[in-house]
Image: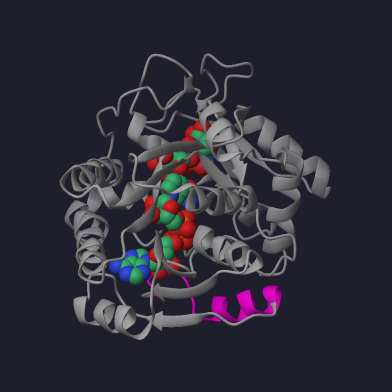
Amino acid sequence: MVILVTGGTGYIGSHTVVELIKNNYDVVIIDNLSNSSKDVVNKIEKITGSKCKFYEADIRDENALDKIFKENKIDAVIHFAGYKAVGESVKKPLDYYDNNVVGTIKLLETMKKYNCKKMVFSSSATVYGNPKVHKFDETIERGKAVNPYGATKIVIEEMLENLYVSDDTFEISILRYFNPVGAHESGIIGENPNGVPNNLMPYIQKVAKGELPELSIFGSDYNTKDGTGVRDYIHVVDLAKGHIKALEKLDNKKVYTYNLGTGKGYSVLDLVKTFEKVNNIKIKYKFVDRRPGDLDCYYADTSKAEKELGWKAEKGIEEMCKDSWNFAKNM
Ligand code: NAD
Ligand code: UD1
């Protein structure tokens, strides 16, 4: 089977390409390298010992998509390509709608044209908005977006459901990620954002490397065990494996939606302390005000993915911290 992976040189995409190759899929990547580098293709080859086809192109470029679908008999698409920085999305909402929503429309139009009807889509726990409970299960309705990035995920989820209603030969799985961290055990691929990171683990990595002086912990007065925010951190390799399961499970009975998390909540301090312990490094931190828009505590109910996909995250927080550092220290 030939799988087109959009955004395949990015953080989650590259780890998923490795798992696809390990599972004997043929992979074609399209990425415009707006947030990754071409070198990742060689790194994937180094890990897997196999080649994958790479197109440097934008998913909004219909001619490029046409060329890819003409040159390859694509059976299914795993769609990661998009922008993901929450703060930037507030400043540049039109760029986010254009890249994420318009990009997905162009991709789906081309898929239709070439009768490729299978898609696994990268969504986010952010689509739940701010429900009254901490444990999010898939029966909770999509909430109100708290930022333009979240809005694009909500729009795309709805669009995919509308598309299926109009054409029930589509086979679609929507995966809602919680907080992906960690890196491939080889230390060859991982997350390396440009500039000052917004997310916790990349920030800790930079402090550990001495590139940033200290971590600011946003809020110490949340109603959690130690006052800091609680999230469901999931190892990116576990997450990548979830995509293979979702791909295998695709059928046209309905649009499937799954949470991908571990089901466990850890606080910011849990993550910092574990990182320090397993890597034997001190992370300097200070407490500052809450970050606007942050929720106090949430984690995934993973029972649906477990039951229907036969998938369960296996790696714990210690491995996440160890692998993150194993990658970052060599960067
Ligand atoms: P990433 O930025 O590392 O990867 C995205 C890749 O897509 C990059 O390589 C980028 O160059 C590429 N890209 C962006 N726009 C493109 C376009 N128009 N055409 C072609 N390529 C394009 O991000 P990631 O963390 O790997 O996230 C992948 C997907 O998962 C995104 O859709 C993101 O919204 C979603 N997601 C990520 C997280 C997270 O915390 N990392 C959480 C929930 C959902
Ligand atoms: C992020 C995304 C969200 C997405 C979710 C899961 C942001 C702002 N939000 O959520 O859209 O749904 O991943 O995919 O990117 N923290 C600090 N100091 C820091 C950075 C973070 O204390 O320098 C804290 C935060 O307050 C939070 C936790 O660490 O409690 C995790 O934050 P982060 O990694 O940014 O992810 P989320 O905000 O959970």
The front one of 52 and 320 is: 52
Secondary structure of the magenta portion, mostly?
A: helix
- In percent of the image, x 67 and y 37: which residue is there? 271
Q: Is residue 282 above or below residue 97?
A: above
- In percent of the image, x 36 and y 22: which residue is there? 140
Q: Position of residue 115 (x, y in %)?
A: 26, 67
Task: Give the quarter of the image for residue 326.
Answer: bottom right
Is residue 312 rendered to the left or right of residue 186?
left
Quick check: can you spot residue 5?
yes
Task: Give the quarter of the image for residue 143.
Answer: top left
The front one of 270 and 52 is: 52
Q: Position of residue 200 (x, y in %)?
A: 55, 44
Identify the magenta region. Answer: 33-48
Instruction: Say which quadrant the C terminus sits in.
Output: bottom right
Quick check: can you spot residue 196?
no
Is residue 159 rendered to the left or right of residue 186?
left
- In percent of the image, x 61 and y 34: which residue is there? 262
